């Protein structure tokens, strides 16, 4: 089962718009280890939007991999199973991951490194923080942090790159893979 280029482009354009939101925050808070716990409404918005898309993409990936739950709810339990078995996810997340640089400092972000379908929230702290933020933003305002925004956006990007593997043969997959790259995250091998 595959997806068409138009569907992918819709997902991609939304990713780019969220990435731009994060890039715009740099003029106020530089991505660094010193600032990773800084929280704001803008970071919360980025987390909520990006993780909502992650949820949609993971649901699509489940269906593309034959996990169709019918009327049951998809959740991180099922998503983590897909993430655990996908070789590309393992290669991109158990390696150094994705890095963003500011002032020649590196901030390493590996959003799926600890994925484990046997653990609540798939063992992903940033996903747990998203859930807390989503269900009670006032009580969990500090979960709207730079660190959670970076983890959410990098997870979103990794899944977009993975989704490229499901493009129909005739849809220019090679072109899409070469030209649809992040303007913010630097892949690390």
Image: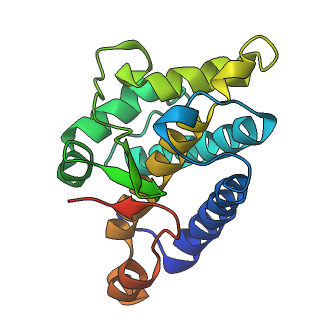
- 153 with respect to 2 (left or right): right
Instruction: Indicate the position of residue 60 as horizontal and vertical percent values.
Output: 47, 50
The answer, for residue 70, to whether it is visible in the render is no
Which image quarter is the N terminus in?
bottom left
- 16 with respect to 141 (left or right): left
Instruction: Indicate the position of residue 85 as horizontal and vertical percent values.
Output: 20, 40
Residue 160, quarter of picture: bottom left
Residue 24, quarter of picture: bottom right
In this figure, what is the number of numbered marks? 0
Instruction: Indicate the position of residue 15 as horizontal and vertical percent values.
Output: 60, 61
Instruction: Indicate the position of residue 120 as horizontal and vertical percent values.
Output: 41, 13
The answer, for residue 144, to whether it is visible in the render is yes
User: Who's the residue at 45% across and 22% down the image?
Assistant: 125
Residue situated in front as seen by the camera: 33 or 59: 33
User: Who's the residue at 54% across and 27% down the image?
Assistant: 73
User: Who's the residue at 72% across and 35% down the image?
Assistant: 44
Which image quarter is the C terminus in?
bottom left
- Figure check: 5 above or below 76: below
Residue situated in front as seen by the camera: 22 or 117: 22
- Figure check: 13 above or below 172: above
- 70 with respect to 78 (left or right): right
User: Who's the residue at 37% across and 23% down the image?
Assistant: 122
Residue 146, quarter of picture: top right
């Amino acid at each position: 089962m595959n997806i068409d280029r138009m569907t992918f482009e819709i997902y991609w354009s939304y990713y780019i718009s969220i990435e731009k939101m994060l890039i715009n925050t740099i003029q106020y808070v530089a991505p660094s280890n010193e600032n990773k716990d800084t929280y704001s409404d803008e970071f919360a918005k980025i987390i909520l939007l990006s993780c909502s898309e992650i949820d949609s993409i993971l649901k699509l990936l489940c269906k593309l991999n034959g996990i169709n739950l019918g009327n049951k709810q998809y959740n991180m339990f099922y998503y983590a199973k897909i993430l655990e078995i996908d070789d590309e996810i393992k290669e991109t997340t158990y390696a150094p991951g994705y890095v963003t640089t500011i002032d020649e400092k590196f901030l390493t972000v590996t959003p799926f490194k600890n994925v484990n379908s046997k653990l609540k929230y798939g063992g992903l702290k940033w996903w747990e923080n998203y859930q807390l933020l989503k269900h009670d933003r006032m009580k969990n305002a500090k979960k709207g942090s730079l660190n959670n925004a970076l983890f959410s956006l990098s997870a979103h990007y990794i899944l977009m790159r993975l989704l490229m593997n499901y493009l129909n043969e005739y849809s220019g997959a090679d072109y899409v893979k070469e030209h649809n790259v992040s303007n913010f995250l630097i892949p690390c091998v």
